[in-house]
Amino acid sequence: MNRIIYPICLSITILGASPNRTSFADDAKPAPKTDAKSAETKNAKPAEAPKTQEKPATKNEAKTEAKPAEAPKTQEKPATKNEAKSEAKPADQPAPNATARPATSFMKDVAPILVQNCIACHNPKKSESKYIMTNFKQLAKGGRQGEGLTLEPGDPDASYLVELIRPAGSPRMPYKQDPLLPEQIATIERWVKEGAKYDGASADEDWTAALRRSIVVDIPDIYPAPTPITAIAFSPDGTSIDTSGYHEINFWNIADGAPTRRLRGLAERVYRIAYSPDGKWLATASGDPGQFGSVKLWIAEAAGGGKPARDLLETGDCVFAVAFSPDNRLVAAAGADRTLRVWEVESGKLTAQIEDHADWILDLAFSPDGQKIATASRDKTSKVFDLKTKEAVSTFPGHNETVYSVVFSQDGKSVMSAGGDNRVRVWNPGDDARQIREMGGFGGAVFQIKLTPDGKQLLACGQDQIVRIFDAIGGAPVRTMQGHRDWVYSVAVSADGKTIASGSWDGEARIWNLADGKPLRTIVAAPGYKPSNATAAK
C-alpha cells in the first residue's frame, strides 16, 4: 500500500482489517509520495486490537460446517425376523462424541463482518439505498429495495441480505468492493438459519458503538515501530510536548527527551490535541478511520495530559479538528461528517451544529472575539461562520485544492488558509472573501499553520519536510528550519512564544528555538522503540 498523506484514515479498522474505502488520507491529501521508501514500513502501527472473530474455516470445513455431525457407523449382528417385528424403531440419537456448535452470535460473529464491509455506506450520515445498518431494527427492516424482505429468520434463502452478499447477488454487496469471504458468508447464513437473533442490549441501540466499547485494545508498552505524528502540542507549563500515539497521547520532557506519561482511552488515531488558553482544559479529536470518531474533554494538568471530564461526541467517522474559544467558554470540533459543532465547556451543552461544507472539515479556528469560526475543508473551500446566526458569512474558493488548515489574524480582519496548492493565502473574511496576499515557496502541500502568541509570525509545515516562519503582517519569509526527513504534518508553539515543536510521518518530533531557528532536540515519539543501526544511520 502506497504511503498517502496525513491522518491515515481507513488503513486500520477497529478489528484490524479495513474495507476498501477512500479515506482522509486518500482523498484529502495530495497524491502518494513516489520515493523509494518502503510503503509497508510507513504504514506500520504498534499493535492491532485483538481480533474477536473466529478463526476462518478451511475450505473443507466451510463446506461441512453447517452439516450436522453423523453418528459413527458400527457393525451389529442383524436382528432376527421376530426381533425385527417386535423391536420399536428408536429415535435418532446424537453421535456419542459430537460437540454441539455454540449458537452464532450477532455481536461476536456477525457484527465484526458488517463493520468491516458494510457500515461505511449504510450509516445515519451515509445511507445508500436508504438502508441504515447501525441500528438492529433498521438493519432487519431493510432499505429502499429490500424493506420487509431483508431478514427472514430461519430461512437464509428468503433473506434479501443473504442474497446480496452471495457471489451471484445483484447487485453483489459490498458494492464495487471485494466480496465477502466464503466463511464470512457462511457465518451470516448460519446466524439467519438459527433465527437471526440480536444479542445486544437493545435492538434500538447503535450496535456499532456497543461493539467498539466491548473490544479491549492492547496498547503495547514498547512500540515495535514509530507511528506518524498527526498531532503535537506543548503542555500548559511548557515543560513537555504531547504527541499522538496508538490509541493514546505520549508526553515527553523537553529538557532531556525522556517519556513522562501516557494518556490512554482514545480512538486509534489522534488528530488534534488542544489546550484552552487558560490551561485548565484539554480537548482531543480522534477516530477509528471509517468507523468511529470522538471528542473528549479533560481537566488539564500543567505538565500535560489530564483527567477525564466528559465525552462530548461519538460519531461514525474521524474527528479531525478541535479548538477552544479565546475566552475559554466554548469548544468546537469538526471532521469527516462535514458538521461543525460547538459546546459550552463547563456544561457540555451543544450550542451550535452547522452543516454547510460539501466534504470533510479538516481544521477550524475561532476569531479573536469568539463570535466566528473559520473552517478548512476537503471541498476546496475555507468558510467563516457566524455563531449567532449559525450561517456562513463568507466562502473563499481561492485554493482550488483541498484546504488543510486555517487561522484568523490577531486583529480578526483577515483569515489565513493553507492548502494543496502549495500556498498560504490571506483573505478578507467579509462578504467578498477577497484575497489580500499569498505566501509561497513551498515544495508541496501545506498541512498546518499556526500563529505565534503575539500574532506577529506564522508557522507553516508540509509535504516538503520544512518548517517555515513568515511575517504574519506582510507575508515575507523570515526563516526555514530543516532537518525532518519526512513530511511534516503538525506544528505547535509554546505559550511563551519561544519554542516550536513539529511532528512528521516517520514519528520524529523536533524542537526548535523560534528566535534563531536552531534545533534543540529530536525525539522519536514511540515509547520504548529502539531503532536498528541501519535505521538510526539514515
Image: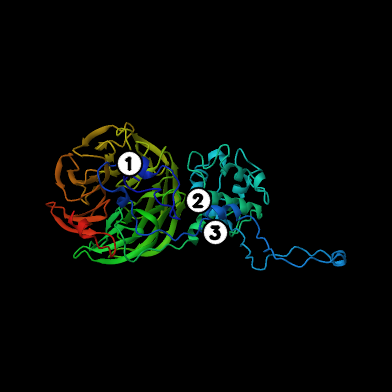
SS assignment at label 1: loop
Identify which amino acid the numbered label 2 is placed on.
Val
SS assignment at label 2: helix
Q: Quadrant of residue 172?
A: top right
Identify which amino acid the numbered label 3 is placed on.
Lys
Judging from the image, the colouring scheme is: rainbow
User: Label 2 belongs to which residue?
Assistant: 115
Q: CA distance from mark 2 to mark 1?
A: 25 Å
| On screen, residue 263 above or below 513 | below
SS assignment at label 3: helix
Who comes first in sequence, dot 3 or dot 1? Answer: 1
Contact check, label 3 and label 1, Cβ < 8 Å: no
Q: Position of residue 255 (x, y in %)?
A: 18, 65
Q: Position of residue 11 (x, y in %)?
A: 39, 49
How many marks on residues? 3
User: Label 1 belongs to which residue?
Assistant: 29
Which residue is at the front of the view, 313 or 45? 45
Residue 108's tag is: 3
| On screen, residue 315 above or below 356 | below
